Amino acid sequence: MTLRLSRFTTLTLCILVALVTIPLAFSHPWLWLPGLLALLLALLGLWDLAQTEHAVQRNYPVIGHIRWFAELVRPELRQYLFEADEEAAPFSRSQRSLVYRRAKNLAGDHPFGTLLDVYRDGYEFIGHSTRPAPVSDPESFRITIGNDQCRQPYSASVFNISAMSFGSLSANAIRALNTGARLGRFSHDTGEGSISPYHREGGGDIVWEVASGYFGCRDDKGRFDPDRFAKQAVDPQVKMIEIKLSQGAKPGHGGILPAPKVTPEIAATRGVPVGQDCISPPSHSAFSTPLEMMAFIAQLRELSGGKPVGFKLCLGHPWEFMGMVKAMLESGVVPDFIVVDGAEGGTGAAPVEFSDHIGLPMREGLLFVHNVLVGAGLRDKVKIGVAGRIVSAFDIASVLAIGADWANAARGFMFALGCVQSLSCNTNRCPTGVATQDAVRQRALVVPDKAQRVHRFHANTLHALADMLAAAGLTHPEELGPHHLVRRVSATEIRLFSDLHVFLQPGELLTGLCEHAFYRRNWDLARTDSFDRMA
């Protein structure tokens, strides 16, 4: 009985206060406010007792709502009051603050030494030289993408905007990103949602991502349409074509944009009917084997007028990628680039199991792709980009050191737009207007200001990269190697990445004498006529 009374004490008090104060309020008007408040709480408590959905509120009327309120504000309280500076969720406060400062052109220096524990396992750093080099001009940090099969090679920055679709991001976010890309002379990946009018407004370089839904280049049945593709691909603003096989946050998983979100402008951009579910299948219909995939690459290269064509994937079965490389050798068709997406990558929404437990992390995927191309004698023809939780100059340097030619960032540029990591991307209620289609919410994102922030974040990050390279005695990112990157592997030992990982020799896989069992075994399993492995 005592326990029951304690559970109902708040409700009982509300009822008593309402019964006492409301009659007295007719002669003492100041009692109306507490009386009506008590009455409303009493009615809420009675509703709690009657409802059948929430057990806590049924057992603890009125006060049970405190739990739901605490759950509601917990992310904000944690992020702004209790989260440690280096606690990643998925980006730490220190990482976000670094982007905000660089985007606003504020000093990025901090006093009193590092906040990192340099003796913890996994701590990494770039080895410096006793004879630092002069600091290079970051404008020179560019690479040429396009092999001898490409007629329109592209001079790309080593740091670019990763795939984010219009529909996932707001129109104003796309405008600001693309305008910032034009100001900084770097590229902007469209994501699988195709090229929207807002990509074209900014005039920035575009990498058109063609995914399994073939948005922007599909027929009425959702199949690839060569004529529609060619019409957009030859546009001078489109610099490269990227075939999306999978993305890090949900590899092997298709997607659906629900019918209510398929607005007329999204439908026009994607080439789908208004008000119908927009489905991205898990796999492509234009090819089903590695050899057919190479033929598709050759077709897109020809239809685009000889522009660089490559593909993006999150590594899964190793023999599948090796089958693609074998198909390159057999067909003679070699893509101009490959983008390795990591399992740590982001997305607007994904099943938890996919985000947490499907796909290879970016660094392991990068090392594998780099090694297979080297071992097959193709590395000099194929450039490698990477994406996956990259926001700082050290993040860029660390992936370039182990095999990448350039790095892409998505969430880093979202922070530059003003994203506060509210983790509400899938709700259409983004508080900063970045990831929403709500016209009122996206009005908060002022395009000219945010475009400048995107530009400054890119420029200041490359300036920081130039400083790091100079300290290591280097003048260009392409000079970075695994011997420049160091990791702590125990409390008493650090190792160079060149000693920590396997690196194949040029052509090693072709000799049949590869010394590394993992690579040799999976190379033998790989096929060109199927993505399945040899029986």
Image (tube, rainbow, N blue to C red):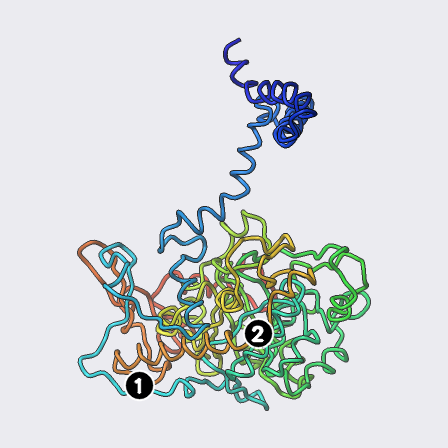
Residue 80 spot, x, y in % from top left: 44, 51
Work out whether residue 95 or residue 326 is closer to the camera in this orientation and state it.
95
Work out whether residue 246 or residue 528 is closer to the camera in this orientation and state it.
246
Is residue 504 visible from the viewing direction of this image? Answer: no
Farthest residue to the bottom: give it: 151
Q: In the image, is 117 to the left or to the right of 511?
A: left
Q: Which residue is mark 2?
A: 177
Residue 102 spot, x, y in % from top left: 42, 72
Residue 244 lies in what quarter of the image? bottom right
Work out whether residue 136 or residue 288 is closer to the camera in this orientation and state it.
136
213 w.r.t. 78: above or below = below
**Circle 2: residue type:** Leu
Q: Which residue is mark 1?
A: 135
455 w.r.t. 392: above or below = below
For residue 348, the mark is: none
**Circle 1: residue type:** Val
Residue at image point 46% right, 85% down: 143
Query: Which of disc 2 and disc 1 is earlier in sequence?
Result: 1
Work out whether residue 62 or residue 134 is closer to the camera in this orientation and state it.
62
Secondary element at tag 1 = loop
